[in-house]
Every structure is written in C-alpha cells, then in structure tokens.
Amino acid sequence: MDVSSAPTRYAEALRFAAEVVDAATRPPHGDHGDELLRDPYAQELLKHQSDWSWCDNRQDVDLAAGGALRATVEYVARRHAVALPDHTGRAGEQWPDVDDRLAWLESALCFAVEAAEEAWPHRLQQVLAPWVRQRLTVLLATTDRAEGLGNLDARVRRAVVPAPSR
C-alpha cells in the first residue's frame, strides 16, 4: 500500500479487523445496542477518510493513517470489553477471500508503521517497521479455510493492537 492507494484501500483493510471481531463476538443482550459501537466507528473511519485530501507532507500522512488505526483499535477493544465470545463458524465460510483480506490488513498496518517512521525519523529511528513486519508475517499468515473464528479473532486482535509478548 502507498499514499496514492491509501484513501480507498486503507480504511477498507482496517475495517476487516472490525468485521472479524464482530463475527467472533456477540452483544450480551442480542443485537440491541450493537449499533452504539459500530456507528461511531464507521463515522470515525469516514471522517479520517477525508483526511487524505490535505496530506502534503510525511506528518500529515502519519496523522491520517494514525486516526483510522486509532479508531479501529478503540473499536476492537470496546467490542471485546462489552461482548461475549461466539466462536461458532469458520473463517473460510465467513470470508471466501480471507487470505486476501489478511494480506490487505497486513499491508495497511505496515503502511501505518512506515508512515510513523517517515514522519518522525529522529524519534523512531527505523526500529518499528522490522519488528512489526516480522510480527505481522506470523500473525496474519494465510489461514486454514477451516480455522475457527475465535483463533482468527485472536490473531487479528494481536496484530491490530501490538504489545510486547511475554
């Protein structure tokens, strides 16, 4: 992914993480209130979609990429905080193109990290991209078509919300 394709493909790739979380969880009281999480997330992504129009330097690209990524991380965290696990179903049944979607998500996350490194080279010193790229290669590897939603959800969540492993 690059800056020219980011306005159309970046948010779409990040949205896959939200779709995985939605498929692997269910609200505790049925679908009532489900839109209270989903609608603000969709609005936030749309707001950041327009950010690309004013990107004319590396810091602007980092701001545009970071805004949509922050919205996705918040949505994933909130959904897991208020929803119950529902791991019935298989990744290949839910998304016939799951491997392509995982590759797009990996590309979007690497783009966000590279944008941050390019925007702040004196602070980050090119240390994030190699670590993140290695981590994403493992977490977002192609899936077995019969992989359960719970396992896919765990991998996607760990990829979107990077934290040091213990």
Image (cartoon, helix red, strand yellow):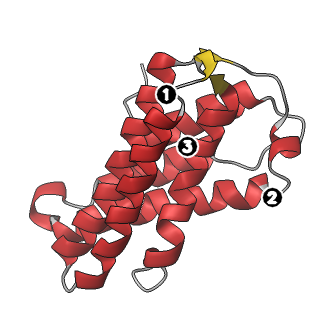
Q: Quadrant of residue 102?
A: bottom right
Q: Position of residue 132 (x, y in %)?
A: 43, 49
Q: Quadrant of residue 123?
A: bottom left
Residue located 33% across and 63% down the image: 47
Q: Position of residue 13 (x, y in %)?
A: 56, 60
Label 3: which secondary element: helix
Q: Residue furthest front?
A: 32
Q: Which residue is mark 1?
A: 79
Q: Nearer the viewer, mark 2 or mark 3?
A: 3
Q: Kindly tell me whether residue 31 is visible in this rendering.
A: yes
Residue located 60% across and 28% down the image: 154
Q: Are marks 3 and 1 in contact (CB under 8 Å)?
A: yes
Label 1: which secondary element: helix
Badge 3 density bin: few <14, some 14–19, many ≥20, Cα 10 Å? many
Q: Which residue is mark 3?
A: 18
Upstream in sequence: badge 2 or badge 3: 3
What amino acid is found at the position of numbered circle 1 in the picture?
A: Arg
Measure the alpha-carbon separation of dots 1 and 2. Answer: 24 Å
Q: Kindly tell me whether residue 129 is visible in this rendering.
A: no
Upstream in sequence: badge 1 or badge 2: 1
